């Protein structure tokens, strides 16, 4: 057995080494630990730990570059989750428990300066500056603004770690609905890192504490995690793509898509940024999406290339176990090419989503007929299409827009095959 103390020393040593490395890579950084993963268990949510108030209290906040408001759950919020599937202890903010907390009244200039449009509302008596925030997934939250102390670690260029703090404005939510109220995806709130002035990044910048630059790398596979810092990347070999300046979000110009070396025949005007549309980078969105013109061509190219014979042929191979490298042989490589020469190359496991069978997947209802089979499924990362790639005790098969009757019959046939045979099967089912 390893003594507890020596294990703790090792962990602290590793953390110290990471701080030194980040100091070399980033210029004057504020470093945040990143948790969560693209794995279905985490629903694609990435979060970090933030300390607020005096004495400091820790909160787990989802990292969201698509919104500017940072908010935490109130102690008096009846609709806020009390437990989380992620195994984290949820915290609730109590104004009375922090000696540095200040509720923002409607008369405060901070309230009138907030530019969230309809989201900013005052209480009837004017005692607090309130908000109502609605998200595109139809979830919502409402509450009031407070000013309090934000605690963080700053790593200097000489690798010195300093404890620092600053006063910031954030929301205290007294109501949550939709996915924000569900235990399945529960965290303590949202860490808003949008482009607007209310984001934590902008607030610290205007106080002269950090540059108006942040860098992040979210690890999709394995245990997840990643890097999230306030500061500039100094690593060599970086390739940049410019942000679209007139867009309210972090938007870029996607020029084209290449699949297995072949250019997807999409009209270039489809991706050209406009006042209303652009390619948005949003850490708070689980999936990636294309406009329909590009999406339909993408699905066709991925499903037909490189093995169209899989739609009609059953291949039997000797099998001991299935590895990701096997999946890579069935699906093509994808490159997303952006303005300025930046290119994002994606392997199949990076654009297909590994998902366990659940009550949310209506298409897999009848697979529960075989409880002795271990089943996982790959679904298109871009949006729901009817394509589901399943692995069950050595069986690998592709289901394409099936009818319930056809599906049941085919699954019975698959279940009668010998367990040491790998079956690659493409079921061409009815689209309706």
Image (cartoon, rainbow, N blue to C red):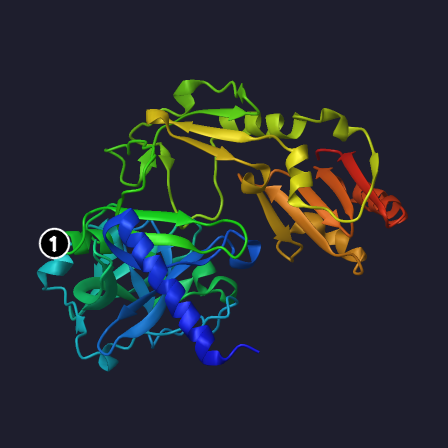
Regarding residue 199, the answer to whether it shows in the image is no
* Residue picked out by circle 1: 208
Residue positioned 53% across, 77% down in the render: 2
Specify whether 346 is left or right of 130: right
Q: Position of residue 101 (x, y in %)?
A: 19, 74
Question: Could you say which is closer to the camera, residue 357 or residue 164?
Answer: 164
Q: How many marks?
A: 1
Q: Secondary structure at mark 1?
A: loop
Residue positioned 13% across, 59% down in the render: 110
Q: Position of residue 97 (x, y in %)?
A: 25, 81
Question: Could you say which is closer to the camera, residue 366 or residue 373?
Answer: 373
Q: Position of residue 130 (x, y in %)?
A: 23, 63
Q: Is residue 424 above or below residue 193?
A: above
Specify whether 16 is left or right of 200: right
Regarding residue 291, the answer to whether it shows in the image is yes
Residue positioned 75% across, 33% down in the render: 430
């Amino acid at each position: 057995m390893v003594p507890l103390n020596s294990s703790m020393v090792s962990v602290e040593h590793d953390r110290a080494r990471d701080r030194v490395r980040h100091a070399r890579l980033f210029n004057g950084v504020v470093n945040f630990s990143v948790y969560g993963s693209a794995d279905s268990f985490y629903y694609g949510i990435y979060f970090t730990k933030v300390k607020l108030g005096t004495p400091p209290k820790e909160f787990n906040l989802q990292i969201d570059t698509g919104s500017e408001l940072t908010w935490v759950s109130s102690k008096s919020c009846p609709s806020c989750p009390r437990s989380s599937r992620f195994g984290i202890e949820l915290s609730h903010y109590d104004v009375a428990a922090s000696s540095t907390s200040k509720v923002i009244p409607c008369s405060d200039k901070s309230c009138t300066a907030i530019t969230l449009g309809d989201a900013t509302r005052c209480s009837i008596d004017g005692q607090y500056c309130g908000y109502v925030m609605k998200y595109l997934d139809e979830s919502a939250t409402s509450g009031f603004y407070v000013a309090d102390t934000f605690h963080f670690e700053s790593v200097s260029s000489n690798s010195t770690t300093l404890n620092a703090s600053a006063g910031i404005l954030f929301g205290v939510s007294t109501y949550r609905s939709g996915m924000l109220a569900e235990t399945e995806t529960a965290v303590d709130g949202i860490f808003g890192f949008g482009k607007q002035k209310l984001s934590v990044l902008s607030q610290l910048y205007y106080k002269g504490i950090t540059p108006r630059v942040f860098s992040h790398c979210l690890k999709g596979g394995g245990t997840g995690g990643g890097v999230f810092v306030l500061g500039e990347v100094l690593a060599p070999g970086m390739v940049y793509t410019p942000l679209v300046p007139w867009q309210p979000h972090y938007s870029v110009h996607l020029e084209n898509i290449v699949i297995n070396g072949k250019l997807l025949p999409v009209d270039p005007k489809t991706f050209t940024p406009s006042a209303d549309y652009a390619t948005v980078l949003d850490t708070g969105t689980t999936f990636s999406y294309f406009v329909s013109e590009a999406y339909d061509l993408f699905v066709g190219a991925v499903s037909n290339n490189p093995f169209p014979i899989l739609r009609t042929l059953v291949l039997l191979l000797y099998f001991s176990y299935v590895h990701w490298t096997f999946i890579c042989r069935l699906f093509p490589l994808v490159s997303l090419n952006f303005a300025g020469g930046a290119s994002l190359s994606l392997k199949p496991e990076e654009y297909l989503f590994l998902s366990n069978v659940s009550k949310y997947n209506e298409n897999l209802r009848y697979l529960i007929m075989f409880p002795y089979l271990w089943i996982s499924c790959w679904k298109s990362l871009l949006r729901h299409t009817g394509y589901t790639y399943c692995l069950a005790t050595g069986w690998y098969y592709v289901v394409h827009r099936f009818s319930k009757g056809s599906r049941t019959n085919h699954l019975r046939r698959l279940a009668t095959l010998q367990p040491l045979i790998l079956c690659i099967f493409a079921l061409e089912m009815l689209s309706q």
